[in-house]
Image (spheres, rainbow, N blue to C red):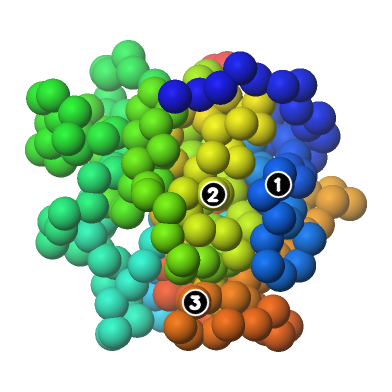
Amino acid sequence: MVSEPVQADWKQIAPGMDILYVTAKSKSIEVNSRITVVRIDPARWELVFMGISQQGQESIRTAREWYETNKLTAAINAGMFAENYRTHVGYLRFRDYVNSAGINNYQSILAFDPKKGKEIPPFRIFDLDASGITIKTILEDYSSAIQNLRLIKKPGINVWKQQDRKWSEAAIGEDDKGRILFIFSRSPFSMYDLNRELLEAGIGIVAAQHLEGGPEAQLYVKSGSFEIELSGSYETSYNEDDGNVISWLIPNILGVRPRVKAANQ
């Protein structure tokens, strides 16, 4: 469960978007043991999926390049992908576009884009093992849904056991006010340790899902004079060092951009 919160020192990037650097209590074997969290108000910012299998998006890119070509403010991995470098691993629907209809055993579903007339939160992370929750019931309310490997179960439960495997991590979370959390750590942690650090960081996190690990993990944010470009490196049994200095090309991303107000607002 979520521990008693400490005071988190958030810094504003833009209205409705803040950043926090969490220094982990359990030191990582590489880098500075720092976890970056970008908090996003979904009432102000639109969450979107973009991938190379969509019309007009045929070029594989880094998170920064996805940002540059699509007028985004932030971009992060959308999740793991198949060997064809196009298809998401797990179910993925973005509005009328279905990237992957396949449903696997991953227990976390990210949902956004409430259907017309639905008075529901604009963004939620669901647990598929919760009573009455299925992808079908989620799609009755939301137009977009993405299935990924679960890290934290609601209402703040670390579902991972300790293990030796560690990696750089990109993840997405939900806080206790329904805000989006883009989470990135170049410093490699076991997912048990990463979850524990997030739950004890005072950020109000109640759910999270894994997006990508190792050198493919990345996060890019630019607003005004503020800019960060973060890429991963370490992954047990694959790339066991901190030597990666470039952002890898990735086929699918989650991005945010300012919501466009209706003309009568």
Q: Could you say whether the residue bearing mark 2 is in a helix, strand or loop?
A: helix
Where is 133 relative to 150, above or below?
Answer: above
> Visible in this render: residue 95?
no
- Identified by mark 2, the residue type is Asp
Of residues 189 and 130, the one drawn nearer to the viewer in this rendering: 189
Residue under label 2, please give it.
193
What is the CA distance from the residue labelled 3 to the residue labelled 2? 15 Å
Q: In which quarter of the image is the N terminus?
A: top left
Q: Tell me if label 1 and label 2 are in contact, CB under 8 Å.
A: yes
Residue under label 1, please give it.
24
> Visible in this render: residue 232?
yes
Where is 137 relative to 190, above or below?
Answer: above
Q: How crowded is mark 3: few (under 14 residues within 10 Å), some or many (20 or more)?
A: some
The image quarter in which residue 219 lies? bottom right
Q: Residue 236 carries which label?
A: 3
Of residues 123 and 36, the one drawn nearer to the viewer in this rendering: 36
Mark 3 or mark 1, earlier in chain? 1
Q: Is residue 192 left or right of residue 55?
A: right
| Residue shown at 73% from the left, 35% from the top | 18
Q: Position of residue 8 (x, y in %)?
A: 75, 27
Q: Tell me if label 3 and label 2 are in contact, CB under 8 Å.
A: no
Q: Residues within 10 Å of mark 2 (few under 14, many from 20)?
A: many
Q: In this view, does 130 lie to the left or right of 153?
A: left
The image quarter in which residue 114 lies? top left
What is the CA distance from the residue labelled 3 to the residue labelled 1? 19 Å
| Residue shown at 33% from the left, 72% from the top | 81
